Image (spheres, helix red, strand yellow):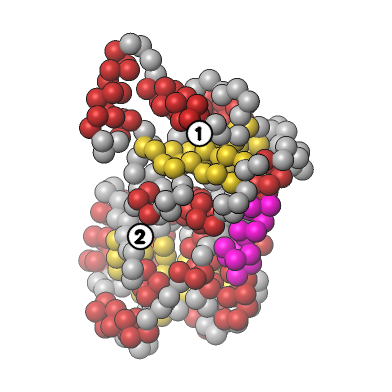
Amino acid sequence: MKKRILFITQHLGRTGSEMVLWYLLINLNREKYSISVFCKTKGELYDLLPEHIEKNVMYKYSPNRSARTFRRLVKVFGINPLQYQLDKIQRDFKADIWYINTIAFPEVFELPKPKGVKIVTHVHELLYAFSEIKSQVLERTISYSDVCIGCSDVVCEKLLDLNHPNVALQYSFIDTDTIHVNEGRVEALKKQLGILPGDFVWVVSGGTKYMKGLDFVLPILDHFKDTSIKILWLGSKQDNALYFYVKNVAERKYPGRVMFTGALSEDYYNYMSIANGFLLVSREETFSLVMLEAAYLGIPIVAFDIGIARQFVQDDMGVVIEGWNIRGLFAAMQSIHLQPDRDKVRLRDAAMAYSSTQQLPAYEALLDRISDSVIIS
């Protein structure tokens, strides 16, 4: 008999945690599993779900006006609309498992635990994210969940620190089949950005914020002011004062040396392929999918010791820096400047170990064990 899983997630947008879920949803064995998806809001992947997957959006954010009107009516009678909606989905779908993707949908953990349903929570957060949520949310996550899945070893360590009895590891991963580069487009972008043949381009990927290491841009430019380096920052431009400060100071002191692309979709890998080196300067990462993408493209890596950097980056692939040592960062970058030709085959092979091809079978096997009530150890 098929197992029935209700997947609960924020949006089904193109964030790292939801892309991993997306790959699972579209590849999960239909002979073994029936799937329903519940989202807080509609992300760009929501309408792309295959027809065999049932889907629902929270009444509050539904594009259907009648659903929003019904929510107001339910509230008049003192009923929690989210609980009413999930109870109705559960009655109709009869899920064996509720699979909650990330702890960033705290409203779910405030509801009474459904009877006879196994609760699985896939945790993609670490200490910084913990500081942004209420203590009761994490406490409730631990007590509410029958199984907690961590997206990396370090996340699993934190869950075990909290004494959860059933912690499983499932690494995040990338879909290498979607990584395509158009060399002609890459050359056109270089010309458009004013990148010269002698420039050494470092790429960073992420939103323009402190946690992603945006403040390191100016010290890097200061240190390498007499070197032909440029920084290409891929990712959304966050409306914060730090971005305003860094952008304006860089434009005044080092015009044309740092370029902020904003969020990208189709051209993302073409922009990344401009790079001669990849920088991972975040203060915290649970995993870092963008590092895998850079490795798959054969780009040497300089990274702080965060996420899976230490276990992933070998000597012929780049350099990992202990702590957030700025001088260590400069030295690591300089070593790549002097010896830019790293083992592209080794880089790509390392990334393939964290590809959907390798990880999806392990992911489904983990779900099989959970659905069969085997204790994870």
Q: Earlier in the sequence, mark 1 or mark 2?
A: 1
Looking at the image, residue 63 sits to the left or right of residue 343; the answer is left
Residue carrying label 1? 93
Does residue 245 belong to the magenta stretch?
no
Q: Is residue 362 magenta?
A: yes
Q: Position of residue 360 (x, y in %)?
A: 61, 58
Q: Which SS does the magenta portion mostly show?
A: helix
The residue tagged 2 is: 235
Q: Position of residue 10 (x, y in %)?
A: 42, 41
Tag 2's secondary structure? loop
Q: Name the residue: 29% across, 29% down.
A: 67
- Left or right, 71 with respect to 314, comes to left
Q: Bounds of the magenta span?
A: 352-365
Q: Does residue 248 appear to the left or right of 337 in the view shown?
A: left
Residue 194 in percent (x, y) is at 26, 80
Residue at (54% x, 72% y) in the render: 295
Residue reaching furthest top? Answer: 77
Quadrant containing the C terminus is top right
Is residue 92 visible in the rendered image? The answer is yes
Contact flag, marks 1 and 2 (Cβ < 8 Å): no
| Distance from Cα at disc 1 to Cα at disc 2 | 38 Å
| Residue 249 at x, y percent in the picture | 26, 61
Q: Name the amino acid type tagged 2.
A: Gly
Badge 2 crowding class, 10 Å Cα cut-off, few under 14, some 14 to 19, many 20 or more, is some
Quick one: 214 or 140, which is closer to the camera?
Answer: 140
